[in-house]
Amino acid sequence: PFLWYTGKSATMALAAAAPPAGMSDYGAVQHRFSPYSFNGGTIVAVAGDDFAVVAGDTRLSEGYEILTRDSSKCYKMSDRTMIASTGFHGDVTTLTRLLGSRMELYKHRHNKVMSSPALAQMLSNTLYYRRFFPYYAHCVVGGLDNEGKGCVFSYDPVGSYEREFYRAAGSGASLLQPLLDNQLGFKNMQGVTKDPLTVDKATKLIRDVMVGASERDIYTGDALEMNIITKDGIRKEIIPLRRD
């Protein structure tokens, strides 16, 4: 026999017949889990004849929530080398701590500090070792090489890397890289005098591109941390960025 329901009784009957939320008509439930999370942020590194600048913003966010406004993305490895890294903050923390411990072990074994190119190779090996379950970390290494010249190394997720003299990475990389290509790489420009890059020009350019990125990228902002690496050591500068 058919039972006819009207009004409130019909609504209750339909609700009782419907499967629970997340369950199909066959009673199967699908659970989702991701080992990664994207915490945003933008990093950039520029190298000159006798210096390197490694910079990044300090915002740590997830989705539309800002978790903290004071999270550094630049990690000091030695007095001549720094790593900037962004992506999933858990993987970034794990990776930089691992590299730090291996550098300390190298120092005790060889009685000297690991050079920037050697650290770049070690980072490549570390990322490649985890190629089947990669670190979610966009990495850029900046510092001085064995001859005292500035160097920048950029990476893909599984350790392939190359030496450059400028590179941006992170959520705002697509905003920074074209301007760096124009101002530092002189791409698609004719009749331009290629003057040597100075510390003052590099820091002003990084400040300008990061201010621009903070206006367009919601994951970039709060403050810009710039680390200027020279033969005398590392000097840090903090510049306010957009906070909304």
Image (cartoon, rainbow, N blue to C red):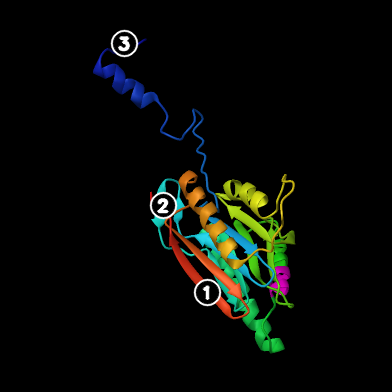
Say which label, 2 or 1, has the lower sequence index: 1
Secondary structure at badge 2 equals loop
75 on left or right of 156: left
**Do the numbered discs 2 and 1 sit on residues whose CB atoms are within 8 Å?**
no
Residue 97 appears in the figure:
no
Residue underneath mark 3? 4
Numbered range of the magenta stretch:
116-122
Say which label, 3 or 2, has the lower sequence index: 3
Residue underneath mark 1? 235
185 on left or right of 54: right
* Disc number placed over residue 161 in the picture, else none: none
- Calculate the distance from the C-alpha at mark 2 to the C-alpha at mark 1: 23 Å
Secondary structure at badge 1 equals strand
Magenta: main secondary structure equals helix
160 on left or right of 208: right
Expressed as whole percent of the image width and height from the top left, the position of residue 190 reads 74, 46
* Mark 2: amino acid: Arg
Residue 141, placed above or below residue 210: below
| Residues packed near mark 3 inside 10 Å, few (<14), some (14 to 19) or many (20 plus) | few
Residue 171, placed above or below residue 224: above
